Amino acid sequence: MSILEKFAALNNRYDHLKQVGADPFAVKFDDIISCVEGVVNGKKTLLFGTNNYLGLTFDDEAKAESIEAIRRHGTGTTGSRIANGSYKGHQELERALSDFYGHTHCMVFSTGYQANLGMISTLVGKDDHLFLDADSHASIYDGSRLGHAPVVRFRHNNPDDLAKRLRRMGDQPGDKLIVVEGIYSMLGDTAPLKEFVDVKREYGAYLMVDEAHSMGVLGEHGRGLAEREGVEEDVDFVVGTFSKSLASVGGFCVSSLEGFEILRLASRPYMFTASLPPAIISSTLSALRTLRAEPQRRTKLAANSRRFYTGLRAAGFHVGPECSPIVAVMVDQPEVAVMFWKRLLEEGMYLNLALPPATPNSSAFMRSSVSAAHTDEQIDFAVALMTRVGRELGLLPEENNVCAF
Ligand code: PMP
């Protein structure tokens, strides 16, 4: 018996993927040519699963500033924010994010995952109550495990279910924190935020919104779902990441709650890890400036998302519930999803294979994310390719089978 025996079931599932020649975990990009093109197995491949929403990974200014930061400040900070790892740049980025969101405080974390881990595990303790949407991202669940607050899960995007669970608590003491996401990372649907705000107000709870996939995407200024829905004043904590629209790595939380700064000394995922390297801080600052200065990227992203989503829907695919840059194509059977994913990669298109059990409702689907950097031609190519392969696998009717009556 090995210590790894407990992974036998996982191993079996993984072996099965490898046997059919579809190992999504082994995809290696031999080269990355642009924000939306790479080379896989020697083949030029169109990237439709990168979260590179604004197409900023190759931005000239961001690259130049990042290189200059390495020249001036070195490759890493070699320390945590509360030791030797707080540079002028970290504070500048925190000020820039506070200014962008109109909040007074900001903490920058080394990843978006850690931002959720650090905030959720710290804000609520054993005498408090944490309310999580059932489809929350792993980092939100993991934050709840690292902390000590009892967790109540409510049905996905269901404010009535949340209200029912809050009502049941009666007047138990303790703070209540509700956590929802702007755009949900797997199916691309948005939270009914106005209704969640009504519930939060009625029950005197705090509200945190993870805008990881909606920052730079939604709202007139790109601040996310809370901006689009006009409820920013009711959101107590906004969490986000640099690894999507801002094209680097890292995470943050902004808030105007008085006393927020003490969290720097209370949040273990903030304290006990090295801070972000200067190159990352500089490219992120640059990308944030571009996000603010170039709203046309957001407009193009919206147009691209519509083109892809409506194209797939018109082809007959069962797509996710809302049009957003995250487009899910539902495939009932996991085996078919695996074959679909494999065939698309062979034909030069990369997207994400989403398999149960790590998916909403244990469904199998293809998850794509659209970028502002995609051209109309690339989107049309992707829709046509998915349609052809979808027909090949019996997911869509044959073209000449369509009945006119
Ligand atoms: N929150 C959500 C909703 C996410 O989807 C992700 C990552 N996909 C994260 C947080 C974590 O962000 P990061 O990858 O930057 O650590």
Image (spheres, rainbow, N blue to C red):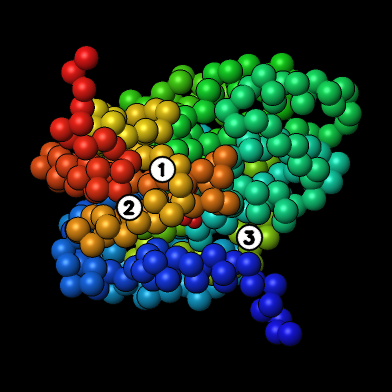
Task: Point out the tag, 1 or 2, that comes first from the N-terminus.
Answer: 1
The answer to which quarter of the image holds residue 300 is top left
| Contact (Cβ within 8 Å) of mark 1 with mark 2 | yes
Percent x, y for residue 45? 20, 60
Looking at the image, tell me whether mark 3 or mark 2 is earlier in sequence order: 3
Q: Which residue is mark 2?
A: 340
The image position of residue 386, as x and y in percent, is 24, 45
Question: Gap between marks 1 and 2, in whole Å?
Answer: 9 Å
Mark 1 belongs to which amino acid?
Answer: Val
Query: Left or right of 69: which side holds 404?
Result: left
Which label lies toward us, 3 or 1?
1
Residue at the image position 52 percent from the left and 28 percent from the top:
191
The answer to whether one can see residue 360 in this image is yes
Find disc 1 in the rendering and name its residue: 331
Cβ–Cβ below 8 Å for labels 3 and 2? no
Instruction: Return the residue nearer the eye: 235 or 88.
Output: 235
| N-term-proximal mark, 3 vs 1 | 3
Percent of width and height locating residue 99: 43, 37
> Callout 2, which amino acid?
Phe
* Mark whose residue sits in front, 3 or 2: 2
Q: Residue at position x 79%, y 45% from top?
A: 149
Q: Nearer the viewer, residue 43 or 80?
A: 43
Quadrant in which residue 324 is drawn: top left
Q: Is the Cβ of the residue at disc 3 closer than 8 Å to that at disc 1?
A: no
Nearer to us in this view, 386 or 282: 386
The residue to which callout 3 is attached is: 269
